[in-house]
Image (cartoon, rainbow, N blue to C red):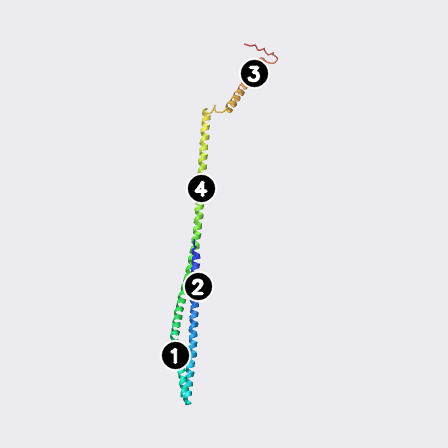
């Protein structure tokens, strides 16, 4: 996609090229006008010189020579008269191009100022867009993080509810028969309690009988 700043710079360069072309045309026309003016000056000098020669020849009684000088003078004057329209046309073109060049120069100066303002606005818009995109990315990241937190909280709550339910079932005895480890442990605890009770009763009997007495034989009932 074309960038506005590059488009503005390209337009500015094209306007500068137009000014360069107008200046070259103006130089060419001025050179042509100057050349015609030099030719006219030379012819005008010839006209004056031939006029003097005609007077001198006539003063010497050389009428034919005076006539020839006047004839050449008329030819030179005819050339001058023929060049005048062209000289006038070149002068008008030169003035017109000068006005055109001046107008173009003003437009270029105005465009250059506007171009820099627009480029600054474009740069600012790019910065704002970049900041906006970054903010949008940050917002999305925060949004994703919030969703992750919510999922984690939901999972923890589910695990806590499951643990609570299992605990309630264990306390109610519903899960007592599930698996064999719990029964074995309970059995060992019961046996340990019975053995402790037997030892206690045995100690009481020993105290009643006293030391030195022979233990009675156990007979089958």
In the image, residue 149 above or below residue 200: below
Tell me, yes or no, if residue 28 can be seen here: yes
Q: To which residue does mark 1 refer?
A: 78
Badge 1 or badge 3: first in the primary sequence: 1
Residue 202 numbered mark, or none: 3
Q: Position of residue 189 (x, y in %)?
A: 52, 22
Q: Position of residue 127 (x, y in %)?
A: 44, 52
Residue at 44% over, 37% down: 151
Badge nearest the viewer, 2 or 3? 2
Query: Circles 2 and 1: CB distance less than 8 Å?
Result: no
Q: To which residue does mark 2 refer?
A: 17
Q: Position of residue 150 (x, y in %)?
A: 44, 38
Q: Tell me how far mark 4 sits from mark 3, CA to CA.
A: 72 Å
Q: Tell me how far mark 1 sits from mark 3, CA to CA.
A: 167 Å
Q: Tell me how far mark 2 sits from mark 4, CA to CA.
A: 55 Å
Local secondary structure at mark 3: helix
Residue 144 numbered mark, or none: 4
């Amino acid at each position: 996609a074309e960038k506005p700043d590059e488009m503005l710079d390209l337009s500015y360069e094209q306007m500068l090229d137009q000014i360069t072309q107008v200046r070259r045309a103006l130089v060419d026309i001025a050179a042509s006008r100057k050349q015609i003016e030099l030719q006219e000056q030379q012819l005008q000098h010839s006209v004056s010189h031939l006029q003097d020669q005609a007077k001198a020849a006539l003063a010497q009684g050389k009428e034919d020579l005076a006539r020839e000088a006047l004839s050449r003078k008329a030819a030179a004057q005819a050339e001058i008269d023929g060049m005048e329209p062209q000289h006038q046309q070149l002068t008008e073109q030169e003035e017109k191009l000068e006005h055109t060049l001046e107008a173009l120069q003003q437009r270029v100066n105005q465009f250059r100022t506007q171009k820099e303002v627009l480029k600054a606005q474009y740069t600012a818009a790019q910065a704002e867009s970049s900041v906006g995109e970054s903010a949008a990315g940050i917002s999305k990241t925060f949004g994703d993080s919030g969703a992750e937190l919510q999922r984690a909280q939901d999972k923890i709550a589910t695990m806590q509810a499951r643990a609570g339910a299992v605990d309630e079932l264990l306390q109610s005895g519903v899960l007592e028969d599930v698996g064999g480890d719990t029964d074995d442990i309970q059995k060992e605890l019961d046996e340990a309690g019975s053995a402790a009770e037997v030892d206690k009763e045995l100690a009481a009997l020993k105290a009643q009988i006293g030391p030195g007495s022979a233990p009675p034989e156990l007979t089958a009932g």
